[in-house]
Image: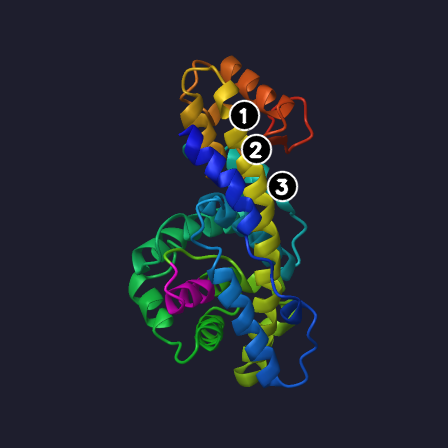
Amino acid sequence: MTYARHELVDDLKTIPLMPSWVTSARPETSEDVAFLSGAALSHLHLVVNRDDVPQTLLRARLALRTAEACLTHQGRPERAADLRDAVAFLQLGDGPGPAGEICLSWFRAVERPVTVGAMHRALPDLDPELIANWLDTGQGPPVARAASVLQAVLADRPRDPASALILADAALAQALAWSHVLPLLALGLKRAELRKLGEELRLACYQAISAGVLEAMREATDLARRAARLYAVAPKLRAKGSDEAVALFLSRDAVAPSALTSLRSDRAARRFCDRLVELGAVRELSGRDTFRLYGV
């Protein structure tokens, strides 16, 4: 295991940077926009299966940001800290509230491989047959297919942009043969652009994908470094159950000490989290003295 961890640290040097001609280009035509969007996706494709990038954590972190973007589209005030609180301390039978429901939908959408069943788990209010029909709506290249699904869902559910964006990103993942949804569209789409149709919506989606890929690449690179740091300090953790706890940090956006059930007690879990902060392996995310949340 130590050897594998050293490999991860060394591999960080080989994470490919986005070519400058993709990030600095100023497209003049819709064909230029589509081409650059495809180039960005092709580059991201090199990263989505890398072992040195904690893929589960990357999807969760992007899901949180996308949920925040969806709430902004709806004019709601909740931000990442509010969403973390809404879902991290849920007890059996609790309701997370409207904002928390959107966040949970995104977290569930990225947890499992893309199937109609997985999308129904994320969006339980939608009929599975209807989900399947929407996902079959799109034709053509991946982004055009995603735009078609987005338009079709919004036509039927104009007040539910979050579901439309989840299914559009699912269609994109299917078209790219990615195993899981990777939230991208909402990271670049503006609220007004969700009212566009046809070619205008497709163009907006191409532009949104380029912006979303850039954010995903920045997050992937940052998380790869942070994961390498966590792997490096893991041998110093003597607590029984620490391996399971470390694995949880690499799969969740935020972790409450109470979720670290592999450790002996809540007190041991809190001490474990504080130790990771001291070692520079995780961060305290809430800024509170109690009910704290930690994340890579």
Residue 221 vertical placement versus 157 (above, below): above
Element assignment for label 2: helix
Element assignment for label 1: helix
Percent from the top left, x then y, of residue 19? 62, 65
Other-residue count near label 3 (Cα within 10 Å), few / some / many at <14 / 14–19 / ≥20: some
Residue 72 vertical placement versus 256 (above, below): below
- Circles 3, 2 touching at the beta carbon (< 8 Å): no
Q: Is residue 17 visible?
A: yes
Mark 1 or mark 3: which is in front?
Answer: 1
Percent from the top left, x then y, of residue 102? 51, 51
Q: CA distance from mark 3 to mark 2?
A: 27 Å
Q: Main secondary structure of the magenta part?
A: helix
The number of numbered badges drawn on the structure is: 3
Specify the amino acid type for callout 1: Val
Residue 296 vertical placement versus 36 (above, below): above
Q: Which mark is residue 233?
A: 1
Please report the residue visible at 62 percent of the width from the left and 53 percent of the height from the top. Answer: 218
**Which of pointers 1 and 3 lies earlier in the amino acid sequence?**
3
Specify the amino acid type for callout 3: Asp
> Camera-side residue: 250 or 192?
250
Please report the residue visible at 56 percent of the width from the left and 23 percent of the height from the top. Answer: 273
Q: CA distance from mark 1 to mark 3?
A: 30 Å
Q: Which mark is residue 229?
A: 2
Please report the residue visible at 60 percent of the width from the left and 20 percent of the height from the top. Answer: 274
User: Magenta span has 253?
Assistant: no
- Circles 1, 2 touching at the beta carbon (< 8 Å): yes
Percent from the top left, x then y, of residue 175? 39, 69
- For mark 3, what is the residue? 82
Numbered range of the magenta stretch: 167-178
